[in-house]
Amino acid sequence: MINLKSQITTFKSPKAAILLLGLLVLGVGGCAAAESPQKNKLAEDIKTAQTSNSTLTLNKVTLEQANEKGETFWKVNSQNAIYSKDKKTVNVQKPTGKLFQDGKEIYDVQAESGEVFQEGNQVFLKGNIVATDLKHGVVLRGNELEWRPKEDVLVVRNNLTGEHKQVTAAAKEARVFTRAKRMEFFGSVVANLKDPIVQLRTEHLVWFVEQQKVSTDKPTEVDRYKDKIVTDRGFADKVDVDLKTKIATLTQNAQLMPADPPLQIESSLMSWNFPAQSVVSPGPVKVFHRVEKVTMSGDSGKGDLDKKVFHLMGNVVGIGQKRQAQLNTDRVTWYLTNQTFDAEGNVVYRQLNPVFNLTGPRAAGQLKDETVIVKGDGGGGQVVTEIVPAEHEKTLGN
């Protein structure tokens, strides 16, 4: 073993095979003006380490790697480094350094230890990883880091956390694709949006940092918090959140369950605006009041959860489960605080006790206690009352 104390060494080459040791000819202390006999002796020691099974220990080392164009891939500083001929690696202790892409610095990194592979295609760091995105300010922490510059991927895993002014996240692993400008989290992902406070839980999350968007194509739970209490809970097979507009789009088996009003909203597609506390569904939607047991559904709908009003349009069906009352109409406005509604267009109201049907152009009332008034429109629209014979009661509502 050759032990060179206080050695400052530079390793810069696209081949990255022997040049780490070759550049040691700069001499002890990094002095390029060292005498020729010292250079020759050091070169002989390097050659001996390369042609034998020995290792070489270096102190105060700077390792660099460049591509064929001369663009730097990475630069690692270490207090202590050990070159292994057999493993074709350099083991470094307390490394700090920078990662580059297209010749530009993109990440600061630090760790407890690491390996630099002799072929120059990979840097592997371990223990108390801190990787800082120099452009966007994202800080990744974990216990393992891989930088594979030719694949344009930075991997951080094992107790991974990510911090940013907009989002914090925890997962089993993160992969950063810098050219594609995206960051992907895998395994037990928990992402917290800071304003408003919203938490996403899923198995795979993609963060487009520059676009200020997060997206997942896996089943996801979305919780909104106020004073550390969940006020609204959403579910969907696919979720997209725009961090600028603070609007979440829930797609496929989408469901939203606000605590106040106590609703269960279901649709294949809905847009949830966090600041406005509103939800919009351009397609079929069903709204169920969990306390009053009243359901309203329509071809589309939009709700103001703050004002507690929901509008449904197209083939609207309202059902009061307590007394088996049913309303059919073209449009309805549902006032959730007092459970009243205004309906307009082709109104049909049916109930079991007493058994009758009402039809007309407009209606108002409550489904939960069957206080419904069907009205004319003042322009010739008539209200028709139909008394249903007892033998037909069982078919009502079908």
Image (spheres, rainbow, N blue to C red):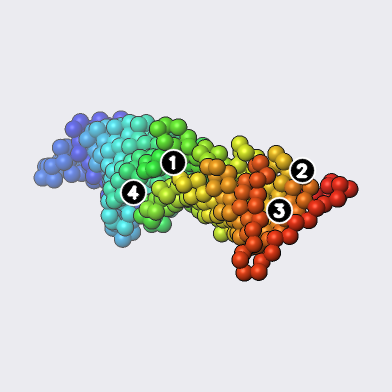
Q: Residue furthest right?
A: 391
Q: Tag 1: residue type?
A: Val
Q: Tag 3: residue type?
A: Tyr
Looking at marks 4 and 1 on the same chain, the residue that comes earlier in the sequence is marked by 4
For mark 2, what is the residue?
Answer: 353
CA neighbours of label 1 inside 10 A, class few (<14), some (14 to 19), many (20+): many
What residue is shown at x 61% (from left), y 64% (from top)? 377
Q: Are marks 4 and 1 in contact (CB under 8 Å)?
A: no
Q: Is residue 174 above or below residue 177?
A: above
The picture places residue 307, in percent across and down from the top left corner, at 46, 47
Looking at marks 2 and 4 on the same chain, the residue that comes earlier in the sequence is marked by 4
The picture places residue 16, in percent across and down from the top left corner, at 33, 48
What residue is shown at x 33% (from left), y 37% (from top)? 130
Residue 182 seen in this snapshot: no
Looking at marks 1 and 3 on the same chain, the residue that comes earlier in the sequence is marked by 1
Q: Secondary structure at mark 2?
A: loop
For mark 3, what is the residue?
Answer: 349
Residue 293 seen in this snapshot: yes
